[in-house]
């Protein structure tokens, strides 16, 4: 009997490069990004982003794990209950900074902490940037990232060691599909609890960010090379586009048209 495919986890990454904020339920709008995903970013010294005229920039313009693995030492929470966006930063379980990113003083608090924490890594003073409706994902398209956990287990098999799914920084984790089955879904529609929800757009090619252990902040394996040697590609996970507005919850069933 074939196992059902279900949503195992939902993750938003409000600030590019910082840790995930797990969600139990989110509302996804048609054609939109995952809620709050990569809505803020930390410029890594070079002032290239113009909030008044926002344009997509490649990841190297910002602090991110591909270049700045030290960021993985930080754990963050993001609270929107007061109407703003209060970012709390923890290191070794202790809060080290807290600020509302909707206010200049809140951003300055976080920027001052990042400046000290990453003094040796950044090219200049960090600046938290944001623009309404803009996102700082690795691709300019408004995609949502989906990761098949059975595929990750197959990567573990060839790597000969555990591989934390958090390395892939995906919005949606699914379980129950066959390993690598998601690559056969390109161009197809995914339904959630019977409602058409996503169109599978493309495979995700992985970069050196996946080589950083999210628990230790060390580059402890070359995951793109593992993928290339074992599977003749460097892809893991797929991008999907929301084709309808809907509520997502962990445990919901996924079916493929």
Image (tube, grey):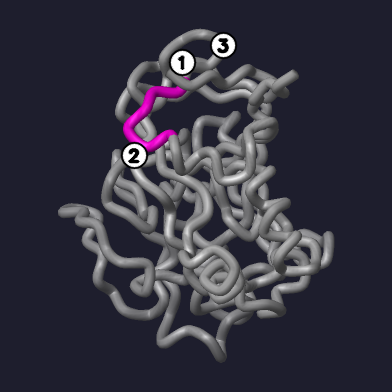
Q: Which mark is residue 201?
A: 2
Q: Residue furthest front?
A: 1
Crowding at mark 2 (Cα within 10 Å: few <14, some 14-19, many 20+):
some
Q: Secondary structure at mark 2?
A: strand
Above or below, comparing residue 199 to residue 113 in the picture? above
Crowding at mark 1 (Cα within 10 Å: few <14, some 14-19, many 20+):
some
Observer able to see residue 16:
yes
Side of 248 where 31 appears, left or right: left
Side of 135 where 23 appears, left or right: right
Front in this rendered view, residue 212 or 236: 236
Which residue occupies 46% across, 15% down?
A: 246
Looking at the rendering, which quadrant does residue 78 occupy? top right
Q: Which mark is residue 193?
A: 3
Q: Earlier in the sequence, mark 3 or mark 2?
A: 3
Q: Earlier in the sequence, mark 2 or mark 1?
A: 2
Q: Quadrant of the N terminus?
A: top right
Q: Secondary structure at mark 1?
A: strand
> Residue 75 magenta-drawn?
no
Q: Are marks 2 and 1 in contact (CB under 8 Å)?
A: no
Q: Quadrant of the C terminus?
A: top left
Front in this rendered view, residue 26 or 50: 26
Cα distance between the residues tagged 1 and 3: 10 Å
Q: Nearer the viewer, mark 1 or mark 3?
A: 3
> Residue 189 magenta-drawn?
yes
Magenta segment, which residues?
185-190
Q: Secondary structure at mark 3?
A: loop
Residue 49, x across and y down, in percent: 26, 64
Above or below, comparing residue 59 to residue 34 in the picture? below
Observer able to see residue 113:
no
Crowding at mark 3 (Cα within 10 Å: few <14, some 14-19, many 20+):
some
For label 1, the residue is 246
């Amino acid at each position: 009997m074939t196992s059902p495919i279900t949503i195992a986890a939902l993750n938003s990454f409000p600030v590019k490069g910082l840790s995930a904020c797990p969600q139990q339920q989110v509302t996804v709008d048609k054609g939109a990004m995952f809620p709050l995903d990569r809505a803020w970013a930390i410029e890594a010294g070079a002032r290239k982003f113009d909030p008044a005229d926002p344009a997509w920039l490649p990841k190297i313009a910002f602090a991110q794990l591909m270049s700045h693995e030290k960021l993985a030492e930080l754990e963050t929470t993001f609270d929107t209950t007061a109407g703003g966006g209060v970012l709390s930063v923890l290191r070794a379980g202790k809060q080290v900074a807290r600020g509302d990113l909707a206010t200049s003083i809140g951003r300055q608090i976080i920027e001052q902490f990042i400046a000290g924490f990453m003094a040796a890594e950044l090219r200049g003073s960090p600046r938290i940037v944001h623009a309404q409706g803009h996102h700082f994902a690795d691709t300019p398209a408004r995609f949502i990232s989906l990761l098949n956990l059975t595929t990750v287990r197959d990567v573990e098999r060839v790597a000969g060691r555990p591989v934390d799914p958090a390395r892939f920084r995906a919005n949606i984790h699914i379980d129950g599909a066959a390993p690598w089955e998601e690559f056969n879904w390109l161009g197809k529609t995914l339904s959630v609890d019977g409602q058409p929800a996503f169109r599978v757009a493309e495979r995700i090619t992985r970069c050196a960010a996946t080589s950083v252990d999210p628990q230790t902040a060390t580059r402890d394996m070359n995951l793109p090379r593992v993928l290339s040697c074992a599977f003749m590609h460097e892809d893991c996970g797929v991008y999907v586009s929301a084709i309808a507005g809907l509520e997502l919850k962990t445990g919901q069933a996924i079916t493929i048209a």
